[in-house]
Amino acid sequence: MLDIKNVYKTFNPGTINEKTALQGLNLHLDSGDFVTVIGGNGAGKSTMLNAIAGVWPVDRGSILIDGVNVTRWPEHKRAGLLGRVFQDPMTGTAATMQIDENLALAARRGEFRGLKWGVTRKERERYQELLADLGLGLEGRLTSKVGLLSGGQRQAVTLLMATLKEPKLLLLDEHTAALDPKTAAKVLELTDKIVAKNHLTTLMITHNMRDAIAHGNRLIMMKDGRIILDIAGQEKRSLTVEDLLEKFSTVSGEEFVNDRMILG
């Protein structure tokens, strides 16, 4: 479902601020893979997601989604293949619009829109069912403005919007980092449920090692724009934070110093 082949990306080349963010990055995801991504600041995690989404062009290499080479596609053209949830709950929804209107916009993504637009009764019934599955009591608040929701509720709605059309690839960019621990755990629970229900191929960046271990079927660690650890199957299921730190030290030859990631 995803192939990243020998991708390089350097920002501000030839200047004092030159920064090589991706260095020969290679990654393959099978359909249905749920991969968690960890790494210190500047490891290339968000750059990788932005490269996949087409936010900026890569310098070298290729990116294929579901067998289609999208390397030279602009961001808007790739949007039909992707779902994305960002760290900030304020991103990804229209605060002044109702919940049902936000969901309707997501449902119509990539479709022709004429002058006549509205949310039909059938659509509202479907949205109520989907919201009821979240277990947050939002199914009775379809006409509430999204800006009035809590951070966790808003992120749950954003997650629903991102997966409404069952994208080829779901990108989660630290989507629980801005939430308190209890709310973050609830959003992660919903993430697991939605990903499993729709058999979605997913890349989830997280700053929390415990979450990276607990969720998904595969874990990768990045450093200096490359993948230095790739753990799956039984090895991942039996993994501990201490094991992960030891593996990092063995592979990189240095200690992992990101306290925020270790402590979660």
Image (cartoon, rainbow, N blue to C red):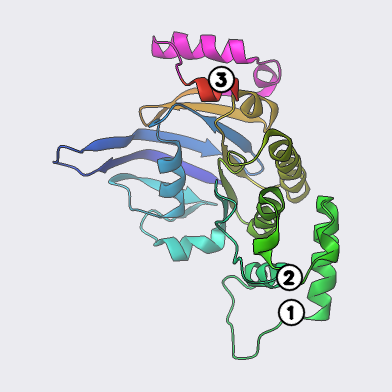
Magenta stretch? 230-257
Q: Is residue 237 magenta?
A: yes
Q: Residue 104's x, y, as percent?
A: 68, 72
Question: Which residue appears at 53% of the width and 13% of the height?
Answer: 245
Residue 77 image position (x, y, % from top left): 46, 65
Tell me the amino acid under the disc marked 3.
Answer: Ile
| Residue closer to the observer: 8 or 181 | 181
Q: CA–CA distance between discs 1 and 3?
A: 45 Å
From this view, report whether residue 146 is shown above or below residue 208.
below
For disc 2, the neighbor class at 10 Å (few under 14, some 14 to 19, many from 20) is many
From the viewer's perspective, is the residue at label 1 or at label 3 nearer?
A: 3
Q: Is residue 129 left or right of residue 159?
A: right
Whether the residues at callouts 1 and 2 have beta carbons within 8 Å, the answer is yes
> Mark 3 = which residue?
262
Q: Which residue is mark 1?
A: 119
Q: Amino acid at mark 2?
A: Asp
Q: Residue at x 48, y 60 (%)?
A: 78
10 Å crowding of disc 1: few (<14), some (14-19), many (20+): few
